[in-house]
Image (tube, rainbow, N blue to C red):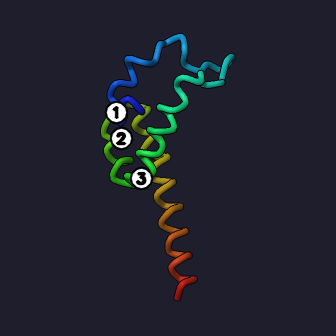
Amino acid sequence: MIGAIIPDLDDVVERGSLTTPASPILPLHLRPALLAGVAIVERAGPEMLDMLRGQMMGANKARFSGAIDEIMTHTCRSMACSQLQLI
């Protein structure tokens, strides 16, 4: 999914360098790209999440959509609470 945000990432990532349940630690050379991708999504906000949802397919799209919906519901509730506190 980060490849949709950072187009050349697929060239850097080798299949053997991805995490597995036996080795869950991300290699050092991939960490800056992952952090940059997270920062881009965080700054872009909900519009970026909707764009990423469009990149997903099948069961992954359903799981991602569920996670996004939950995040958005929680965010909207917390924003409403903080706005009420300002009043």
Q: To which residue does mark 3 refer? A: 43
Secondary structure state at the residue bearing disc 3: helix
Circle 2: residue type: Leu
x%, y% of residue 62?
A: 42, 39
Nearer to us: label 1 or label 3: 3
Asked if disc 2 and disc 1 are in contact, CB closer than 8 Å, the reply is yes
The answer, for residue 63, to whether it is visible in the render is: no
Q: Earlier in the sequence, mark 1 or mark 3?
A: 1
Q: Residues within 10 Å of mark 3 (few under 14, many from 20)?
A: few
Q: Amino acid at mark 3?
A: Arg
Q: Nearer the viewer, mark 2 or mark 1?
A: 1
- In this view of the protein, which residue sits in the foreground, 8 or 61? 8
Query: What is the spatial separation of the Cα atoms under label 1 and label 3, in whole angstroms?
Result: 16 Å
Q: Considering the image in quadrants, where does the N terminus appear? A: top left
Q: Is residue 68 visible?
A: yes
* Residue on which disc 1 sits: 4
Q: Secondary structure at mark 2?
A: helix
Figure quadrant of residue 24: top right
At which x and y percent is residue 82? 55, 76
Give whichever of discs 2 and 3 has the lower sequence position: 3
